[in-house]
Image (spheres, helix red, strand yellow):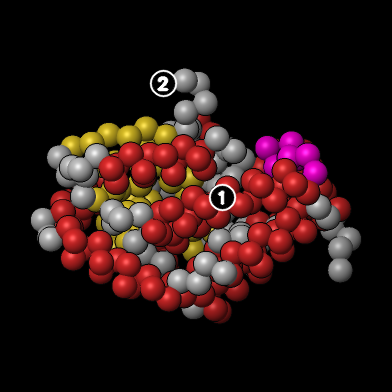
């Protein structure tokens, strides 16, 4: 395994478990993660034996703390920023469109891109220690996928609560608003997620695949173009440059945008 591998994949019978694997960085997502996730899903779809996927975080604290913010500042110019955002959106679409059901097992913090990964999954189980947030406005951005899918999953007002105010919700509240289907004790989370995958795997695979496709039939891919351009525009602003600098320097930001 090379040093830039950010996920590990383990299979046990019909259920594969994908770990976001940077526990020392709270499983923050770098540029390398997005194509690796798509490639892993494609391999599992093609292997002929996997019938369900569980996505979780390595370690005991975080599902994923979101994008690696320091890395955002390394994207040089609008074309690079647009390309990065498009790559992220392709990965969220790959999860939603995967022929296999994908269950998120949220074992801790799910912030920013981590929360968006949960939104892209078909079902979400959460540890009683989990919490969710989309705090990108604190650095001058918005969650490009979260603003698209959040309203369908948990409603417009809760999405605004999380995106505009950057408010964090705990596991119990996430269950109440529909972001999470079940909250379970922390120590049993992965076992329960795998057991759910096994229950799905016992059902007729074609029926499961078609059922997922039919439920998702209202998903509008055309909306991603607006998100792509809007987030790219924000990434080019002085507010985002200030937000990233403030984050890396561990100080309050001084925003001036209108």
Residue toward you, 131 or 151: 151
Residue occupying image coordinates x 74% and y 36%: 74
- Relative horizontal placement of residue 125, taking residue 85 as reference (left or right): left
Residue at (80% x, 44% y) in the render = 77
> Residue visible at 41% across and 54% down?
95
**Element marked by disc 2:** loop
Give the residues in magenta: 71-77
Where 76 sits versus 175, above or below? Answer: above
Q: Residues within 10 Å of mark 1 (few under 14, many from 20)?
A: many
Looking at the rendered structure, the secondary structure element under dot 1 is helix
Q: Quadrant of the N terminus?
A: top left
Q: From what the image shows, is residue 175 above or below residue 31? A: below
x, y (%) of residue 122? 34, 61
Looking at this view, is 166 or 101 the one in front?
Answer: 101
Relative to 57, is 31 on the left or the right? Answer: right
Give the image location of residue 206, x and y in percent: 19, 61
Say if mark 2 contacts mark 1, CB within 8 Å.
Answer: no
Front residue of 21/200: it is 200
- Kindly identify which numbered label has been placed on residue 88: 1
Q: Any magenta on residue 53? A: no
- Which numbered disc covers residue 119? none
Can you see residue 61?
A: no
Q: Quadrant of the C terminus?
A: bottom right
Q: Quadrant of residue 202?
A: bottom left
Disc number placed over residue 1 in the picture, else none: 2
């Amino acid at each position: 395994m090379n040093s830039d591998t950010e996920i590990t994949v383990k299979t046990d019978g019909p259920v594969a478990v994908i770990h976001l694997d940077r526990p020392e960085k709270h499983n923050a997502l770098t540029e390398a993660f997005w194509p690796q996730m798509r490639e892993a899903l494609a391999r599992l779809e093609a292997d002929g034996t996997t019938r369900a996927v569980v996505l979780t975080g390595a370690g005991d604290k975080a599902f994923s703390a979101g994008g690696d913010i320091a890395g955002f500042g390394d994207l040089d110019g609008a074309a690079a920023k647009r390309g990065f955002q498009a790559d992220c959106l392709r990965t969220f679409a790959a999860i939603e469109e995967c022929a296999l059901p994908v269950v998120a097992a949220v074992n801790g913090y799910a912030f920013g891109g981590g929360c968006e990964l949960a939104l892209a999954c078909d079902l979400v189980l959460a540890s009683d220690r989990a919490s969710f947030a989309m705090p990108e406005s604190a650095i001058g951005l918005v969650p490009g996928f979260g603003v698209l899918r959040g309203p369908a999953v948990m409603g417009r007002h809760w999405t605004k609560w999380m995106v505009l105010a950057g408010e964090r919700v705990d596991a119990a509240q996430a269950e109440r608003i529909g972001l999470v289907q079940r909250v379970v004790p922390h120590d049993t989370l992965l076992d329960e997620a795998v057991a759910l995958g096994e229950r799905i795997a016992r059902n007729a695979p074609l029926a499961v695949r078609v059922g997922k496709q039919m439920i998702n039939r209202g998903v509008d891919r055309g909306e991603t173009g607006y998100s792509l351009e809007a987030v790219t525009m924000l990434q080019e602003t002085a507010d985002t440059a200030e937000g990233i600098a403030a984050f890396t320097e561990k100080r309050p930001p001084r925003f001036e945008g209108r």
